[in-house]
Structures are given as C-alpha cells and as structure tokens.
Amino acid sequence: MKILAIETSCDETACAIVEDGTKILSNVVASSKQMHEKYFGIVPEVAAREQLKSIIPVLTEALSGSNLESIDALAVTIGPGLIGSLLVGVETAKTIAFVTGKPIIPVNHVLAHMYANFVRDERNNNQQLTTNNLTIKQFNNKTIEYPAISLVVSGGHTELYLMKSVKELIWLGGTLDDAAGECFDKTARLLGFGHGGGVAIERASRSEVSLREKAKLHLPRPMINDESYNFSFSGLKTAVMRECKKHLELKGSDPLATVASGDRSVRRSETGSDPVKTSFAYEIQEAITDVLVKKTLRAAKQYNARSILLSGGVAANLRLREKFLAKLQTNDLTKLSLHVPPVPLCTDNAVYIASYAFFRGKPSDWHSIDATPDLPVEV
Ligand code: KG4
Ligand code: ZN
C-alpha cells in the first residue's frame, strides 16, 4: 500500500511516499528555519507564508518518480502545531482527496514521530557513529519487541508511551511546561547560539575544553526522581539564566554577560571555543539527557519492556543515544534493545506521517478533517 503523506505542522514543508509503512519511495523536506533566526524563535506568520510557497514544489518533487494514480491513500498531519502552517497541509490534502476520491488519513504529529523507527532507510543503514569509545549503530532495522517504551522528544513535546503492539499505545506522562527541545533552543539563545539550539549545544559541548573545565557548573535535573512520568524543563532554563547572571557579575566583559542582560545585539557564536560557553553547553546537555534516560529506563523496568524507542528532533542528539547505549550494556538491562531512527528521520519529515498512517491510522471523510493546533497527545 502506497501512502502519500503531507506534513506542515511548523516550519518544515514535507511530502513523502512510503510503501507498506516501511519502504521510502520519496522524501522531500523544505525548511524555513533560517528565516526565523533573526527573530530568535519561529514567527508563525512567516512559517505559514513559507508553507504556502513551498507546498506545491515539494509535493511535485515527491511525486516526480510516481504518479498520483498509483497512490492508494493520503495522510496528513492535522495537529498539534501552528494553525497557519497546519492549514496549508490539511487543505492541500483535502483538495487532492476531493479531486481523486482517494481515502485520507488524519495524523497526530507527536504520535507519528515514533513510527520513524519502523521505516527502513537503506541509505543510512550502514552508518556507524563512534563517540567516547562507544560505537552507535543504526538500530532501526532490529525487530521491535513488545512491550516497548517510546520516548518522543521534540521541540514542543517530551512524551513517554507504553507500546503494547504496533497499534496499541498508552500515554504514561509528558511535558508540563517547556519540552526538552524547547529547553535546548531557549538556553542556546541565552548563550548566543541563535535558532536551532539543540544542534549548536551538542556541537559546543564537544569542543576542546577539558572535562574538568566543562564540569565546573552544576545545573538541576528537574523531576528526575519524581514518581510520575511527567517532565518539566522550564526550571532548568531559569537556572541557566541565573548562572549566566552570576557570571555577568563576576566577569562583566564576557560576551555571555551581554546575552544574560538581554541585549539582543550580541554577536552570535557557534564556535563553542569559549570555555564558559562550553561548560554551559556541556552541562545543559548532561542535565536534559540525564532526566530523559533515567525516567525512560524507570518506565522500561516498571513495564518489563523489551525495547526502547527514541524519536523526535532531540533523539538526533548523540550524547542521548550514547547514554542509553551505555546503560543498556549494564547487567539488568542487556535484554532491552534500543531503536533510534537515522538522524534525518528524527527531525520533522513526512515519512513517519505515512508510516503512522499505515500502521495505526484510520481513513476519514475529508469533510470531517480539520487542522487542530492543540490536538491532544494523551492516548
Ligand atoms: O521533532 P522536531 O524536528 O520538531 C518538532 O516537532 O518540534 O524537533 C525539533 C527540536 C528542536 O528543539 C531542536 O533544537 C531539537 O529538536 N534538536 C536537537 C538536536 N537536533 C534537533 N536537540 C538536541 N540535539 C540535537 N542534535
Ligand atoms: Zn516534530
């Protein structure tokens, strides 16, 4: 079954064709990320306009190797997301469904992220990443055994699910305030790294400064020992702000001080060679990943899970993958297998939208499909 999927929930315009939920036939993504950089965050109006400009070229490219007649169904993200952006994808998909009479499947963006783990990506299969003496293989082609614990970590969500089968999901807990990705983004901005923070923090945390220097700073691990499976990262962001201010009082001339004082004219730097910025970046990444790993493993133990699935933009983080891998090599966890999509399938794309639609979606009458910005993620 060939599904043509459309994803426009935020600042990416994406279309893909996937066969039987696993085989990528085409995958096209256009992003307006760079246009938002000067505004220190995504501007919904700009994102929506870019969606409008990109949707037809992206759709045309995704369909260039096939024709519309060979498509069995359409899938489209209906939420959660930005209303202006969502409307572009939803109305495009509804129009195609109306004109062709093909079935259309509405998709929840956050739930769909985890289905990136079900996709075979031949191009990225042999990729091996070696960091800190650990070799991280691509895990996405291992068979997923159930029950599984699925952690979705994106810009707007940090959600934990129990997966009893490919279809059966139970929400265990999630974002109370800032999501993990949002915390990466906001603290990166505080440090002057600009938009797209997670990647910049990861890069800076790896730069050539001694581990002792990096570990000078200690930040909180919010809710790490809390009994629920909820997450809260706004306190971590506030702690970073407080530490930045402390630094300002000690060393008024440091560029970091200008950021902490709220001066937006600060020159952005992504070099990370500044030891202070490096230690901030290092500790922010350690704090976020510690919380994610600990709570996910606790859920895995509680539900006797046989697999752990990571997904969402933050799952691209190598330190997160590395920490999970290291933990799974210890005594009582060796039976758990880790599944992580290749990096390009962690961040927003339409491949996992099609995969979700195949495994878990239900076709609906196109009249009843609406863009739903606050679509719940608790199932
Ligand atoms: O899933 P995604 O592409 O979009 C949403 O659905 O939100 O996730 C975007 C988030 C951003 O917050 C970005 O900073 C974060 O994923 N991200 C990373 C990395 N790559 C992207 N966070 C940490 N390390 C990375 N390498
Ligand atoms: Zn996403």
Image: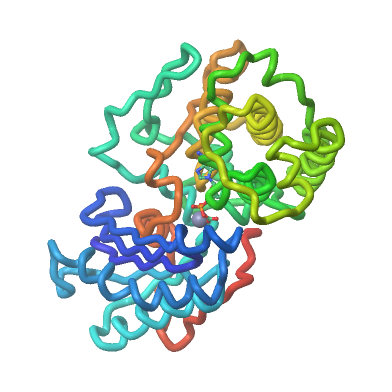
| Closer to us: 156 or 111 | 156
Report which quarter residue 246 is drawn in: top right
Residue at 53%, 77% (x, y): give it.
Answer: 45
Count of residue discs: 0
Residue at 15%, 69% (x, y): give it.
Answer: 70
Residue at 15%, 74% (x, y): give it.
Answer: 69
Vertical relation: 33 (above or below) 218: below
Residue furthest to the front in view is 253
> Where is residue 325 drawn, in percent x and y?
52, 22
Colouring method of the image: rainbow
Report which quarter residue 277 is drawn in: top right
| Closer to us: 159 or 104 | 159
- Quarter of the rendering occupied by the N terminus: bottom left
| Closer to us: 163 or 339 | 339
| Closer to us: 287 or 361 | 287
Residue at 37%, 59% (x, y): give it.
Answer: 350
> Where is residue 117 drawn, in percent x and y?
41, 42
Left or right, 246 with reference to 58? right
Q: Is residue 34 visible?
A: yes
Q: Is residue 295 visible?
A: no
> Where is residue 6 drawn, in percent x and y?
36, 68
Left or right, 335 with reference to 139? right
Vertical relation: 30 (above or below) 249: below
Left or right, 95 with reference to 177? left
> Where is residue 146 drawn, in percent x and y?
51, 37
- Quarter of the rendering occupied by the C terminus: bottom right
